[in-house]
Image (cartoon, helix red, strand yellow):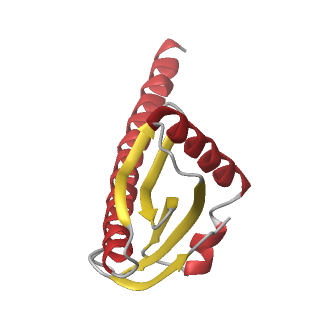
Amino acid sequence: MRKQFSIEVLTDTIKSERMLIIKEKETGWKKELGTAGEKLAAEYLCNKEGYQILSRNYRCPVGEIDLICRDGQYLVFVEVRSSSSGTLNMAAESINYRKKRKLKQLAQYYLLRERRNFTLCRFDAVLILLDEKKQAAKEMRHLKNAF
């Protein structure tokens, strides 16, 4: 009986290690996709829309904001959603109630912490469908005042 138990434990350990390796690969792939999308979004907002990028990947105890920009008199918090498959509608639908609430909390934290004197704030979203090489956007949609 002891041998059988130790074999089961060993099998479970091997499965756990495999799952960790798979998860690391998925996380690296998602991070690469997100980074590529954020770079393209920042370039688009600066060059085409005339935004000034104030911060990229602003991290705090509450979480992370992809881009914080200035658009005239507005302070704009931008959520970037990248995909290499599917549609832009799927990306838009992934910004659900929980994500919106989290972004509002992040914005409040940023405004209190950084003491920015903007009376007008808004939330934009940039949805990007990337090519297979993750180097160019097949399709991009900028949603001003998304929520």
**Residue 134 x %, y %:** 30, 74
Quadrant for the C terminus in the image: bottom right
Location of residue 125 in the rendering, given as x and y in whole percent from the top left corner: 54, 68
Of 69 and 5, nearer the camera is 69
| Residue positioned 64% across, 48% down in the render | 104
Q: Position of residue 99 (x, y in %)?
A: 64, 52
Q: 8 or 132, which is in the foreground?
A: 132
Q: How many marks?
A: 0
Q: Is residue 42 above or below residue 106?
A: below
Residue 84 as seen in the image, left or right of residue 120: left
Tell me: 137 left or right of 11: left
- Kindly indicate the quadrant of the structure image that contains residue 59: top left
Residue 7 rendering spot, x and y as whole percentages: 45, 25
Position of 82 with respect to 107 (left or right) is: left
The residue lying furthest to the top in this view is 2
Please name whichever residue, 105 or 91, is drawn nearer the observer in this view of the structure: 105
Tell me if 131 is positioned left or right of 86 in this view: left
Can the viewer see residue 6?
yes
Q: Give above or below for 94 relative to 99.
A: below
Q: In this rendering, is residue 13 above or below 59? A: above
Q: Residue at x 42, y 75 (%)?
A: 84
Give above or below for 135 relative to 31. Answer: below
Residue at 37% across / 75% down in the picture? 50
| Residue at image point 44% right, 55% down | 68
* Residue at the right extreme of this rendering: 97
- Viewer can see residue 77: no
Location of the N terminus (image quadrant): top right
